[in-house]
């Protein structure tokens, strides 16, 4: 219900500002494929919000409704896509309730990451460590942290007794916003590529 006295047009503008770019970025993410060369993934995200990182590029989006979307793409030295991730965090509160939701989805290719023959959990740990490295811009640092936090929680689900590492200290602020104990999934497709997912919902 919109507040009394708020014009319908203004309400619509706020809604569009909060939701419009998310759909565009989501479509861009879906267009990215593992192994893609640079000419095929260029400008998949709005150029104004795309930032280079130490391992590829990323895109970060926040809206007035308490939603953050972080997209991270890792590249090989030849600029081929070796991994892609999308993390969504929603934090909303009202007089009646507080809502927290987080979801990470991603795909990665151990061969392109130069991690062929490495175990699944160790692959994730290497990627987490890479994402937690110092970044060139605050946007890249934030985008990487949102993705790395979800991967860290996924590892904890698989190895609850040994999921902690020194990297967690660098991710401490974001990990406070991404609770453990959520739903974790990791699968391998017919080409040996990994599909990962971690989700947590305060309302479940």
Image (spheres, rainbow, N blue to C red):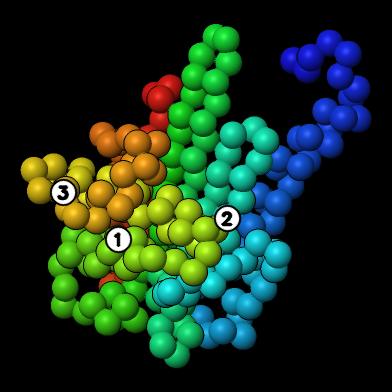
Q: Secondary structure at mark 3?
A: loop
Quote the CA–CA distance across marks 2 and 3. 27 Å
Q: At 59% across and 76% down in the image, what residue appears?
A: 41
Q: Which quarter of the rendered picture does the C terminus lie within?
A: top left
Q: At 61% across and 81% down in the image, what residue appears?
A: 40
* Residue 160 higher or lower than 181, as above or below: below
Residue toward you, 31 or 154? 154
N-terminal of the two: label 2 or label 3? 2
In percent of width and height, residue 175 lies at 33, 42
Q: Is residue 142 left or right of residue 191?
A: right
Q: Are marks 2 and 3 in contact (CB under 8 Å)?
A: no
Name the outermost residue toward the bottom. Answer: 78
Quote the CA–CA distance across marks 1 and 3. 12 Å
N-terminal of the two: label 1 or label 3? 1
The mark found on residue 60 in the picture is: 2
Residue toward you, 52 or 88? 52
N-terminal of the two: label 1 or label 2? 2
Q: Secondary structure at mark 2?
A: strand
Q: At 76% across and 35% down in the image, what residue appears?
A: 15
Q: Is residue 86 visible?
A: no
Q: Secondary structure at mark 1?
A: helix
Q: Are marks 1 and 3 in contact (CB under 8 Å)?
A: no
The mark found on residue 163 in the picture is: 3
Name the outermost residue toward the left. Answer: 161
- Density class for disc 1 (Cα within 10 Å; few <14, some 14-19, many ≥20) is many
Reading the image, the residue beneath label 1 is 128
Q: At 37% across and 42% down in the image, what residue appears?
A: 173
């Amino acid at each position: 219900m919109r507040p009394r006295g708020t014009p319908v047009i203004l309400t619509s503008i706020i809604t569009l500002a909060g939701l419009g770019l998310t759909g565009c970025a989501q479509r861009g993410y879906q267009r990215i494929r593992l192994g893609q060369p640079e000419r095929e993934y260029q400008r998949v995200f709005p150029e104004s919000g795309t930032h280079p990182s130490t391992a590829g590029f990323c895109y970060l989006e926040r809206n007035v409704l308490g939603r953050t979307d972080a997209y991270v793409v890792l590249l090989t030295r030849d600029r081929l896509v070796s991994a892609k991730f999308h993390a969504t965090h929603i934090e909303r509160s009202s007089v009646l309730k507080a809502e927290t939701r987080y979801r990470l989805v991603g795909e990665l290719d151990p061969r392109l990451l130069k991690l062929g023959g490495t175990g699944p959990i160790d692959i994730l740990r290497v990627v987490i460590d890479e994402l937690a490295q110092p970044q060139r811009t605050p946007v890249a640092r934030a985008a990487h942290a949102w993705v790395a936090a979800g991967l860290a929680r996924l590892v904890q689900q698989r190895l609850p007794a040994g999921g902690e590492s020194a990297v967690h200290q660098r991710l401490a602020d974001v990990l406070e916003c991404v609770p453990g104990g959520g739903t974790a999934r990791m699968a391998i497709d017919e080409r040996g590529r990994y599909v990962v997912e971690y989700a947590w919902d305060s309302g479940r």
